[in-house]
Amino acid sequence: MSDLFSTYAKKEEDRLEGKQLEDVPVVRDYPKVFSKDLSSLPPARTVEFQIDLIPGAAPVARVPYRLAPSEMKELSEQLQELSEKGFIRPSSSPWGAPVLFVKKKDGSFRMCIYYRELNKLTVKNRYPLSRIDDLFDQLQGSNDILIYSKNEKEHKEHLKAVLELLKKGKLYAKFSKCEF
């Protein structure tokens, strides 16, 4: 039986220790795929998205949650960074949702927006497919790309093909989550 070669993304705590992009010959030609900092929005896509609301729904604005001074500082810093990168812009929308923070394993904070009230006013799409929430439940936590090959030569070709597709689609991967 031939060896099975694989490249896959792993949990953050199992990341490559001390390895740099330049240390992995197959991927060093794809630095844009493994960008350390997303400094701006990706290019515009040809697909347009729209969230339809229940006709006549009045805008919902919930009172912000109380935040500790340290959380207010974190909120200010994250909003400033997102604004500088062009990910967000000032708004005078009558809609509003509260913000809360969840501490990540590395000690930093993930900003979460509580959109439940808005979600109650969205038109639920009906599809002849499986229930979308069931599909999402199955995908929960799946952000891995698994590449299996019969031998090392074939594996390098497959890896290059995947990286080329990511590069062409201007999609990104996190190098620290990869194992080669």
Image (cartoon, rainbow, N blue to C red):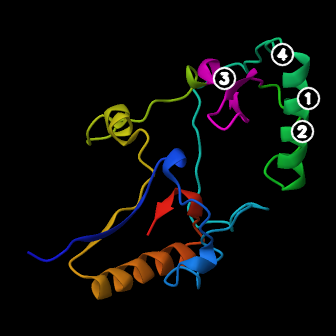
The residue range painted magenta reads 96-118
From the viewer's side, name the closer residue of 45 and 169: 169
The amino acid type, in three-letter code, at marker 1 is Lys
In the image: residue 79, left or right of residue 52:
right
In the image: residue 9, left or right of residue 121:
left
From the viewer's side, name the closer residue of 127 and 134: 134
Q: What distance separates the C-alpha of mark 3 from that of mark 2? A: 19 Å
| x and y percentages locating residue 47 in the rendered image | 56, 61
- Give whichever of discs 4 and 1 has the lower sequence position: 4
| x and y percentages locating residue 137 in the rendered image | 36, 34
Mark 4 lies on residue: 67
Q: What distance separates the C-alpha of mark 4 from that of mark 3? A: 14 Å
Q: What distance separates the C-alpha of mark 4 from that of mark 2? A: 14 Å
Q: Residue at x 19, y 74 (%)?
A: 3
In the image: residue 75, left or right of residue 36:
right
Q: Which of the 4 image quadrants contains residue 120?
A: top right
For label 4, the crowd category at 10 Å Cα-Cα, with few meaning under 14, some 14 to 19 and many 20 or more, is: some
- Give whichever of discs 1 and 3 has the lower sequence position: 1
For residue 139, say whether it is visible.
yes
| x and y percentages locating residue 46 in the rendered image | 58, 67
